[in-house]
Amino acid sequence: MDHLRLLPATGTPGGSPVTSAPVAQGVFPVCEFMHGLSSSPQKSLAIIRPLAEAGFIVPAPHFANLNDQDVYNGNQSKDVSEVITRTLALNTAGDPLAGHINTAVGVGVSGHSMGGMTTHGLLTSWPDARITAAIPMSCVDMGNPSPAVRAKVLFTHGDRDGTCPISSARQAYRELPAAKAFLTFRGAGHSNYFGDSRTVNTSVDWMRWSLYGDTAARDRLRADATSSTTTWESALS
């Protein structure tokens, strides 16, 4: 399994990622991202880079042979749990990330399409109790919420999605307790909202609130999401 891992580094913010750059001072939460079918981490940088720039360590595995069966039988969710385990294990002596991973606040997970389904699977049928924040994008309902997981969950979806019907994601949203939110892109399909600034800004601020306790980020969420072609619904407490 190949992977891309972006993280906060020393130097001036902005610009292109630098290979093997020194890790910035401080400790940072982990926020995993998983791509969808026929995609890759490199095609998902519109989400991954802003998360790293906002102070997250973002492991983004590449599953070249991603398929329906592995998503629906739980193998994909279990693989992401293993990615989380291996990432957290880097917080040990001898690795450049040693002492830089915040292991006390839990872990964030996010993903689009099959990556979103895998993300929801980690909250339901194949739960990972380490997860405290999640953003399933263009997902379907993968099962009943697990009492083992207490996560703040943001759903993002286009209401014209012909691949993963929004009705299934809405069912998943209804089943979960607060804190939760649902960002609907009216007129959008399966993926054409992916790099939209409203998607990026709400994703970053959702993770900032969930994993940094950043209440200013929480208070920006409605403005982040609001436009003439979006609908924001939330139960934040």
Image (spheres, rainbow, N blue to C red):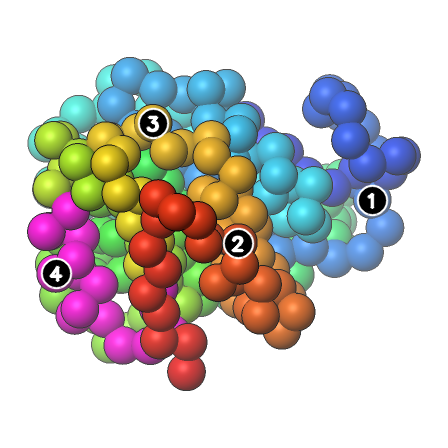
The answer to whether residue 93 is magenta is no
> Residue 47 in the image: x percent, y percent?
51, 36
Q: Quadrant of residue 9?
A: top right
Q: Quote the CA–CA distance across marks 2 and 4.
A: 24 Å
Q: CA distance from mark 3 to mark 4?
A: 22 Å
Q: Of residues 32 and 16, which is closer to you in this image?
A: 16
Magenta part of the chain: 166-181
Residue underneath mark 4: 171
Q: Which mark is on residue 224? A: 2
Distance between the Cα atoms at labels 2 and 1? 27 Å
Q: Mark 3 or mark 1: which is in front?
A: 3
> Which one is in front, 162 or 40?
162
User: Which of the labelled discs sits on residue 24, or is there none?
Assistant: 1
The residue under the point 35% across, 20% down is 39
**Which amino acid lies under the numbered mark 3 shown in the image of this protein?**
Asn
Up the image or down, 92 lies above or below 199; here it is below
* Mark pair 3, 1: CA separation: 33 Å
